[in-house]
């Protein structure tokens, strides 16, 4: 059972949830990122996700370790899909179980924020009027600290 | 030989995800980046991309040896 | 498709999630409450949940309306199970979709807090050494304000 | 006739979830509570239970009419 997983197949949410439920979990916070059609005035037709797969899985695992330090009773599983995704498809599913609910919410939110900082996955938007890699790919701005926060 | 990996807009500009470089002695990450530009020309965003050496983020002064993999990581946008 | 549901059947998480995903949702925050074995030193054998069903469904719907006021783009679905539940069984599943993730987390968390305040559902713990209705059923303390916050 | 609903520890003490009371004229919620105690005896927690009239939370002074349903809601513990 792989807790941190990059896949080109559709994500089964329940599979991810099942990885973290155990007899002393009382709460699971699940975050599901789906493909949204409208971003401001732009209409998305579909998305492509690309990853540096082995490093992305390592970074997901690192996020799980960071969560374990902050919330020792938490158990985390993350699956991110790559390839072509249609509107409403699930791009990422994060499940965090904890004995009590506050920790589950905080840890799940922490996980998605960290994914957007340190995991080498890229999204290309295919709009009705063009396409673009998301995330300032032109390099006109650098990361605020020259690197994602927390990367040594 | 050092394997260079490019992703997203960098790969798109380069027309490839993989470039090989021959080095005789260990060199810095920054020198690898310069050699890459000499070999395939300027890539927009290369200077601000993060760099991973053997799947770990590193700084410009880290040392690259024969057999290593260097990946240029433009701003990530997963999730 | 019933968005606010009290059921005596096992909960299918994906069914609840599917009720809230639509073309302009980009994030779904799911909260799953499961039966935990240990509470401090006490060991639970199983739980029983009882509800005032029609009123509980109305109150769940009211929570959905409160969320709609606070987060107008949110879509909410809640299913709560009643009857006898074993360790690790799912008691409640809340799904909230929004265009952006912060709202989904906040609204989902709001929903579970409100369930614990205003929805007429009761839990009886069957411990290895006895049983008790949870929630100060002896009436030795009253609600801080004489009623759950927000109840008029 | 007014239907009274009891739940959780209240139902357990009363040995029933439903009690019927006959009223001639409208009475207050508080009076219903008193009549209930006269009919079935003291229930621990009844005085601090919330009260719902026809599935909506109400106060002690609200008016109960023939045909209404009054539910006594001990501290909830769902989720």
Image (spheres, coloured by chain):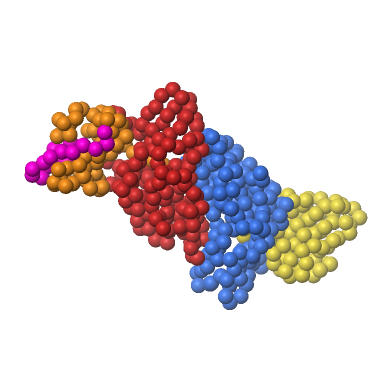
Chain colours: A red, B orange, C blue, D yellow
Judged from this view, the residue extending furthest toward the right is D24
In this rendering, position of residue C71 left or right of residue B4? right
Does residue D68 appear anywhere in the picture? Answer: yes
- Image coords of residue C119 (percent x, y): 65, 53
Tell which of C29 and A3 is nearer to you: A3
Question: Residue at coordinates 45% horizontally, 37% vertically from top-left?
Answer: A85
Tell which of C59 and A126 is nearer to you: A126
Tell which of A32 and A90 is nearer to you: A90
Number of labels in the image equals: 0
Q: Quadrant of residue A81?
A: top left
In this rendering, position of residue A101 left or right of residue D10? left
Range of magenta residues: B16-33
In this rendering, position of residue A133 left or right of residue D24? left
Residue B17 is inside the magenta segment? yes
Q: Quadrant of residue A148?
A: top left
- Image coords of residue D25 (percent x, y): 90, 53
Q: Quadrant of the N terminus of chain A?
A: bottom left
- Image coords of residue C98 (percent x, y): 52, 39
């Amino acid at each position: 059972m792989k807790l941190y997983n990059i896949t080109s197949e559709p994500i089964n949410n329940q599979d991810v949830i099942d990885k973290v439920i155990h007899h002393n979990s009382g709460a699971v916070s699940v975050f599901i990122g789906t493909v949204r059609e409208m971003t401001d005035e732009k209409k998305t037709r579909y998305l492509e996700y690309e990853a540096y797969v082995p490093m992305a899985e390592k970074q997901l695992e690192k996020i799980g370790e960071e969560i374990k330090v902050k919330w020792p009773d938490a158990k985390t599983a993350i699956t991110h899909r790559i390839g072509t995704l249609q509107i409403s498809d699930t791009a990422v599913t994060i499940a965090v179980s904890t004995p009590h609910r506050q920790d589950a919410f905080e840890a799940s939110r922490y996980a998605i924020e960290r994914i957007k900082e340190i995991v080498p996955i890229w999204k290309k938007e295919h709009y009705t009027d063009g396409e673009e890699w998301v995330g300032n790919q032109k390099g006109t701005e650098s990361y605020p600290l020259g690197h994602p926060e927390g990367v040594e | 030989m050092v394997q260079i990996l490019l992703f997203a807009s960098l790969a798109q500009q380069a027309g490839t995800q993989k470039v090989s470089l021959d080095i005789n002695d260990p060199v810095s990450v920054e020198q690898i980046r310069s050699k890459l530009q000499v070999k395939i020309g300027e890539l927009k965003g290369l200077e601000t991309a993060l760099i991973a050496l053997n799947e770990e983020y590193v700084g410009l002064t880290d040392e690259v040896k024969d057999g290593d993999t260097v990946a240029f990581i433009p701003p990530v946008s997963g999730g």
